[in-house]
Image (cartoon, coloured by chain):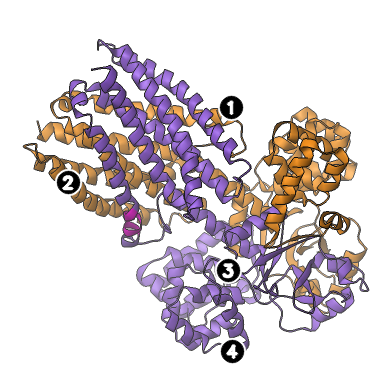
Chain colours: A purple, B orange
């Protein structure tokens, strides 16, 4: 059988045909979990790549998941544990003894071990760490000493460093003989006597240079040094801007204490992007796997804020109840002005929040951006003022003052779209200055402003000129 | 001076202090562009990393930018040209002769040359390619032959491949002697006689193995093969899932024709994320640098669609004008129901669109997700029904039927939040099935549904029970 053959050499070939294979292998797994023997399941699991197995654990629920986790934890693969989603990983580590968890994390790279440990309670973490051998424990503790979401937490403390006066031959011999090196690395560091980084050299350069070449001759032109306290969200920007594969991480004294590699950075970048998208959509850290109660409570806060702002808009409308009583057409039309403003504001906001996240919006172009949004709001305002005005005139032609009503909706539209543009830029910038993530709160604020201004402008003008 | 020293050895050290240095170097550049000599500018530019220089070009405008571009294009650095934003890159290539552009792109990796060429007109591209030396031209044409936004367009046709029966020593000697290798690579491929990939080996493994080791002994356990036609957005998912640094790209016959490396994938991932965020926000491919006219026209379409849907909602309100005339409180309260539905719908939508993009939503959990959103909508609906009902009863206590009004807003709230949850899941899934990017259109549709259902439920119930 193919499965048992694969389990022998453990080669996973993932190619165009394999997604069907993975999915049929998953179906077999579900069948076995329902009525197979433990042995049949364990042998079937050999055919899974640890990443696919982690996905499978996330897709099944209830008793099947419990049975599967019970089986995989017997000889727990560190890669599998690391790939599991946070809450599943907790379920597994909670059911193991501190010694068992310690054995698994000892086999991990230090950055992975830090990520497994950082979500745990203080006392749980201390218990596990006390079972980890000294050398690995020290590496892990270096990472844990830095605040969450910093480069220090994401760095690997295992890295390869050589002296400036080493030769290529000496370096290759060192790499062959030294036991304690990271599993995988793309670059090595040249350091001075004080452990301060002097440069980076890619492995391809070393392999392509003759043995007598000095390290100093082949050091890369760009050396990017990341302080361990740097917020992790800034790291992907550096990697992308300077096309890095590895960056050295330094402590406050400027000494090299770890490295961050591009594969870890990709994960950080994805997490940070996700966070921004979800925050812009008014949801916190939620994913599709979350249960009903988790999802309800995570969304509750923003719905509550939205209820508050919706009531604010209603209060504005309530100020004009006498006007509305005299002319119900105003009630029919008023959501159009508010909705267009909300939409235009969200557009500007989205652009601004992304530009801030990518550090594309700096002191050099802030004023220009402001002016642009003012003009864009005015231009689109004029276009949609005409459209809304014309539609109104025809729709309410049975009223005596349809033309005036059309003019009023047109003016309100221009006002609201200009306000939408300006607040769509100003609010995120203001929040960033106040050190609040602009993705979190700008959306609700901008639509509140456009709702209030929209109703106020339209109903206010109507009460002055129509009645 | 530090700048001239840096220009000598061309080492760019980017560390915690350098962002101020980069920004003061930029200020000096602006000053020189205003009243310096060409020579002073050119010599100042030596101190810039090409990525910082590309940023600088994007930040200045008008005559200063024209002067700067005029100077950099004299001895154009291929890295700089590649890093420039699309419209600036066009400005530069348009002002150069086909031969000059050909010289620059010949120095690039094939994937970079493809990206520079793919945005050009057909005839412009043909003219330039005719000036590129045969070997490089063939590499570029292989990439250009695949459709836009596929793996084939992003692959590098330069890669290192060895036979299964080669030894480590033989491989190292080959790498040292062979001239025509990519600038930078992390892995090499083992291929059979038919050029079909048999495995991947990381450079660190090669460096760490004794010279007599056979390639077949140190091949990586996971080999991911990307067909050249694969949509580029799927590539980052594979890289992240299987922790890859390099993936081989194969043609329809399964032969290795190129490779994609993790640094390029990071760029693809960022582009795809950006696209999703901007689409969710109702803007196309816009960035903060776009001019007024570009920005206005890009946003126009969605504003127009929004005007249509807003009018639809107004028509629904118009159906109840007799009801509104009798009780203006309904006009005051109706936006609350619509706004809460829109917000809840957007939350569900955001989660669903992200889950679809990450391929987290599959046939195995679609039904579960549906059921979950139904329950979440109902639970949050009940909570906010109570809140909105109580507020209404107090707010309109001067009316005789405030209790009934409160009950009506409560029921309408539950209905709308359930509808919001269900449509927030159903619409993106439906669009995905119809091969439309769910990020593009779901937002407008979901808020249209919640507006219409919100007004209909609230005003409909009011017209039945209140009057």
**Residue B251 seen in the figure:** no
Residue B431 location in percent, x, y? 45, 40
Q: Earlier in the sequence, mark 1 or mark 2?
A: 1
Q: Describe the element under mark 4 as helix, strand or loop.
A: loop
Relative vertical location of residue B448 with respect to residue A379 in this rendering, above or below:
below
Please, which chain is the residue tagged with disc 3 on?
A: A
Quadrant in which residue A335 is drawn: top left
Asked if A284 appears above or below B274 in the picture, the reply is below
Question: Residue B77, image x and y in percent?
Answer: 83, 45
The subunit carrying tag 1 is B
Q: Nearer the viewer, mark 2 or mark 4?
A: 2
The answer to the question of whether label 2 and label 4 lie on touching residues, with beta carbons closer than 8 A, is: no
Q: Which residue carries the number 4 mark? A: A133
Label disc, if present, on residue A49 of the rendered structure = 3
Foreground tag (3 vs 1): 1
- Residue annotated with mark 1: B293
Tell me the quarter of the picture where residue B219 sits.
bottom right
Q: Is residue B161 above or below residue B290?
A: below
Q: Nearer the viewer, mark 3 or mark 4?
A: 4
- What residue range appears in magenta? A295-301
**Are the residues at dot 1 and dot 4 in contact (C-beta closer than 8 Å)?**
no
Q: Can you identify the residue that label 2 sits on?
A: B389
Pick whichever, A368 or B281, lies toward us: A368
Q: Point out residue B81 in the picture as x, y percentages from the top left corner.
A: 78, 42
């Amino acid at each position: 059988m193919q499965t048992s053959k694969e389990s022998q050499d453990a080669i996973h070939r993932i190619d165009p045909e394999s997604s069907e294979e993975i999915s049929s292998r998953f179906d077999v797994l579900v069948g076995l979990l329902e009525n197979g023997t433990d042995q049949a399941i364990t042998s079937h699991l050999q055919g899974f790549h640890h990443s696919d197995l982690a996905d499978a654990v996330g897709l099944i629920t209830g008793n099947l998941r419990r049975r599967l986790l019970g089986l995989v934890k017997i000889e727990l693969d560190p890669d599998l544990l690391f790939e599991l989603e946070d809450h599943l990983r907790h379920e597994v580590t909670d059911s193991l003894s501190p010694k068992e968890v310690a054995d698994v994390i000892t086999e991990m790279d230090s950055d992975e071990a830090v990520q497994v440990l950082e979500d745990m309670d203080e006392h749980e973490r201390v218990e596990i760490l006390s079972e980890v051998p000294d050398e690995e424990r020290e590496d892990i503790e270096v990472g844990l000493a830095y605040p969450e979401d910093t480069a220090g937490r994401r760095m690997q403390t295992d890295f390869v460093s050589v002296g400036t006066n080493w030769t290529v031959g000496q370096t290759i011999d060192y790499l062959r003989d030294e036991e304690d090196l990271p599993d995988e690395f793309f670059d090595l560091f040249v350091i001075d006597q004080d452990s301060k980084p002097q440069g980076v050299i890619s492995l391809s350069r070393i392999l392509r240079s003759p043995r007598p070449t000095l390290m100093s001759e082949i050091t890369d032109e760009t050396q990017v040094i990341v302080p361990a306290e740097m917020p992790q969200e800034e790291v992907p920007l550096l990697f992308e801007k300077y096309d890095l594969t590895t960056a050295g991480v330094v402590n406050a004294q400027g000494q090299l204490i770890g490295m961050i590699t591009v594969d870890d950075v990709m994960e950080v970048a994805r997490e940070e992007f996700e966070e921004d998208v979800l925050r812009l959509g008014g949801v916190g850290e939620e994913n599709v796997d979350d249960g009903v109660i988790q999802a309800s409570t995570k969304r509750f806060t923003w719905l509550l804020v939205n209820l508050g702002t919706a009531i604010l808009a209603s209060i504005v409308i309530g100020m004009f109840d006498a006007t509305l009583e005299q002319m119900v057409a105003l009630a029919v039309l008023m959501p159009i002005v508010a909705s267009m403003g909300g939409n235009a504001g969200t557009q500007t906001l989205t652009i601004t929040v992304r530009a801030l996240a990518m550090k594309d919006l700096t002191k050099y172009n802030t004023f220009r951006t402001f002016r642009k949004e003012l003009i864009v709001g005015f231009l689109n305002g004029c276009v949609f003022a005409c459209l809304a005005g014309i539609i109104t005139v025809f729709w309410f032609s049975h009223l005596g003052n349809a033309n005036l009503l059309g003019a009023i909706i047109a003016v309100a539209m221009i006002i609201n779209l200009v306000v939408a543009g300006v607040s769509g830029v100003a609010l995120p910038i203001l929040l960033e200055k106040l050190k609040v993530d602009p993705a979190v709160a700008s959306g609700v604020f901008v639509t509140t402003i456009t709702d209030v201004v929209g109703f106020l402008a339209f109903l206010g003008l109507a009460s002055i000129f129509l009645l």
